[in-house]
Image (tube, rainbow, N blue to C red):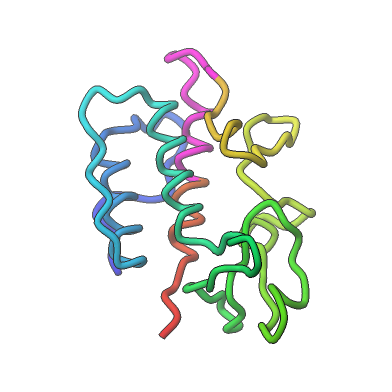
């Protein structure tokens, strides 16, 4: 798996449509999906929210009676579990241990996407839009784009 763009982004980098399509292409490759490319002219906040939704779609979810399977492992071979819930011993009856991807990547008890500098987390789909910031202040968006990169880069398909 090879990234076509330069990652992670640093202060003063311009965020381009090609960056988001690189994220999208890599998620498609790793998850065996075919999400459509991000359309030119799409609002930056909407693109970030769309990518968050797509990433959540490849992590386990509660299906009413059991957790769906996690298809991705961390470096220790433990599957990533659903976001927003702390790492625990088991996803369900007869299933092995799992790791929250945010808790592993960012530590400090973090369980979900971060939306604010004060550490407020976006724990539900309704809050997956990042906060608005001015075009002159791109640093918050660079953080969100790098966060997407970090999570996608950590996803390793379980064979």
- In the rendered image, residue 121, in percent from the top left (x then y), is placed at 69, 38
The vertical placement of 121 against 149, above or below, is above
Quarter in which the C terminus is drawn = bottom left
In the displayed structure, would residue 104 be above or below residue 111? Answer: below
Q: Is residue 146 above or below residue 75?
A: above
Residue 73, position in %: x, y?
53, 76
Instruction: Find residue 117 and report its horizontal and vertical position in percent.
Output: 69, 30
In the depicted structure, whether residue 70 falls above or below residue 139: below
Number of marks in picture: 0
Q: Is residue 136 left or right of residue 26?
A: right
Quarter-of-image position of residue 9 = top left
Which one is in front, 7 or 72? 72
Q: In the rendered structure, does residue 86 fall within the stretch colored magenta? A: no
Q: Residue at x 49, y 72 (%)?
A: 72
Query: Between residues 29 and 76, which one lies in front from this camera angle?
Result: 29
Question: What stretch of residues is rendered in magenta?
Answer: 132-146
Q: Depth check: give the residue in front, 62 or 59.
A: 62
Q: Residue at x 66, y 63 (%)?
A: 100
Residue 136 locus on image (x, y percent): 45, 13
Q: Residue at x 67, y 55 (%)?
A: 106
Split into 4 quadrants, where in the image is the N terminus?
bottom left
The verdict on residue 139 being magenta is: yes
Residue drawn at (72%, 57%) of the image: 85
């Amino acid at each position: 798996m090879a990234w076509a763009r330069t990652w992670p982004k640093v202060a003063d980098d311009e965020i381009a449509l090609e960056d988001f399509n690189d994220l999208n292409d890599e998620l498609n490759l790793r998850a065996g999906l075919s999400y459509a490319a991000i359309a030119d002219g799409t609002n930056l906040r909407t693109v970030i929210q769309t990518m968050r939704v797509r990433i959540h779609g490849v992590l386990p979810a509660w299906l009413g009676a059991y957790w769906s399977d996690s298809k991705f492992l961390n470096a220790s071979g433990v599957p990533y579990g659903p976001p927003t819930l702390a790492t625990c011993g088991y996803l369900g009856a007869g299933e092995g241990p799992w790791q929250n991807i945010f808790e592993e990547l960012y530590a400090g008890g973090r369980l979900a996407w971060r939306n604010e500098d004060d550490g407020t987390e976006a724990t539900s789909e309704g809050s997956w839009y990042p906060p608005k910031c001015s075009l002159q202040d791109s640093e918050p968006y660079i953080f969100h784009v790098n966060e997407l990169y970090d999570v996608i880069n950590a996803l390793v398909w379980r064979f």
